[in-house]
Image (cartoon, coloured by chain):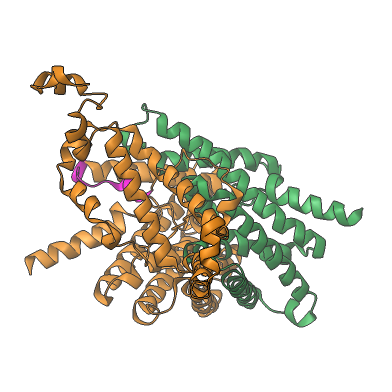
Chain colours: A orange, B green
Amino acid sequence: MHDRGKELLKGIRDSAVVKNPVLFEAIGLAPVAAMAVSLKSAIILAVVSCAELVVIELLACLALKRIKSYFRVAVYAVLGVLINIPIFMLFERFAPNETQNAGIFLPLLAVNSLVALHCERFAVKNPFGKTFVDAVSASAGYALVVLLVGVVREILGSGTIYSVDLKLPVQLPGFLYPFGGLLLLGLLAAGVKALILRRHPDAHPERAFDMREISQSHVGKLRNLLDADFNPYDEEETAAPAPRTRTEKQRKKQDAPASEASAQAPQAEPSESPERRTKKAEKKMKKRAKPEKAPRGKAAKAAKTPSDVPKAAAAAEQPQRTRRAEPEDYLSEFDEILSELDAYREKYGMPDGADKADGAQIPASGGADDAEDPKGGEKP
Amino acid sequence: MSILGSLFSAALYACLFQNLIFSGGYGADEAIRMAAKPKQLFPLTIFIVYFSTLGSLICVLLEQSAAVRALNIFWHALLFVGVLVALYLLTLFVVLLFFRAKPRTVRRLGVAAFNTLVLAVPFINYRAAFGVFEAIGAGIGAGLAFVIAVLLINFGLRALDKNEQIPKSFKGTPAVFIYVSILALAFTGLTGTGLGV
């Protein structure tokens, strides 16, 4: 019971603070930067966003799990606008000026990325209880940030709070622009991060915003338009490759002391391998797309025999089939990666390479191995 | 000539003089997250330009009807979201049926179709009473604005990532937000409005 309580608290802390949607995940920035310019408009924004997030996330958890993700995204947008309309009508009665001042940002909340990302990352993968906790804590974290930014911008930019004049000697209307909102968000994020790091040194709020791929080419290739991997919602691939296609030899190689070898391997390679893998996979796809060459000479004669004609036709159809069957694609790509790994191991004299050359091919630590190897002098 | 003029002026307005991302804040989160994964910029931009231009055009054509013009802003929102959903489903159907796209490709379509930048364009057309060619220009300009924003943010992120002098609490999103706010300040200068300082 005590553990469950701790787990619940940790979940709330993670969703609301450590992985705060605005401050650390950079989600739902547009309305905060542009619309939260006063406390009243911040309240409207917070209420609409919270209602949207909680209702849609719970609906996604209860009813949308079986629908494919690319249909769900459209459903979120429609649900968002349908939830917005009654709330807007309610606010128009009680705060007509603020609702008008919000301009087009209230209707734009229908496609707020906060909703789509939380639903896809969390709601469709978890049970109702966990989803509820995530929805409530994430919306609370979002609302707190919105209200705080709204209050500070109203004080600094207009010299008022909840439309009450504070009679400040200086006003900075620049804070009412989106750049002012972003600046405040940056300072607020830094302050919250400093507090988190002081109280929970093991928490890593910076991990919520993935910056590992920033140095990749920003141009890309035209052919990547339909082939490059893209995972905006951090989904797991449904057709994950299972290691069932490995041969016995590959299994044996893995069972060998791989840890020892990986320690000796150069560090630059792992960062390069995904690009190489993509290129190889692309090449393989191209190869598959090409029709197989017609057999020549004796092979052609043999193929022309009546019994072999259906086999040849089946062989000609084979590439087409493999191209359409996606799981096989993944498996073959995985096979390719494994064989590449083997070649790499052999190149640097890892597990099975060791019995061939006694570690002589290892470039970095070869000297040390020589010293330990009693047959060092007999090497070719 | 006047057609081209209205198209180009609307495009320039949307991407430079009133950059929708920096001056308006529309699609700022998508731009920041895309800047952190720049490999996807080119394909995603094509889809964003496609959805913003076509969505904007269809919505402007619908606006020609007096009954649609008489609707208030929230019924307009429902209409615009409906147009985007229809366009998205149609594109999905074409991409899946004719191009046999993989599931990972169609994820990109969803992000491109449903974001504040794409939905903002029909609203801007509606507010500014743009015509057909201006609407097309605004759609193209929104896509260009996205490219400009992502490239500028990406260059900054690379520099911020290498900078070891940034205090630990400012590393990550705090520094990114402050950098983007400086860019936004520069683009706000292009709009010609005074900051009242």
Is residue A234 at least partly visible in the picture?
Answer: no
Is residue B98 at least partly visible in the picture?
Answer: yes
Q: Is residue A373 left or right of residue B194?
A: left
Which residue is depicted at the point 14% across and 42% down? A257
Dividing the picture into quadrants, the one containing residue A132 is bottom left
Residue A42 in the image: state x and y as whole percent: 46, 61
Residue A120 in the image: state x and y as whole percent: 39, 67
Q: Is residue A205 above or below residue A307?
A: above
Q: Quadrant of the C terminus of chain B?
A: top right
Which residue is depicted at the point 34% across and 71% down? A123
In front here: A72 or A189? A72
Residue A255 in the image: state x and y as whole percent: 16, 49
Residue A159 in the image: state x and y as whole percent: 50, 48
Q: Is residue B180 above or below residue A129?
A: above
Q: Is residue A6 above or below residue B174?
A: below
* Chain part drawn in magenta: A198-209
Q: Is residue A11 left or right of residue A90?
A: left
Q: Residue furthest right?
A: B1
Q: Is residue A208 magenta?
A: yes
In front here: A75 or A350? A350
Q: Is residue A240 magenta?
A: no
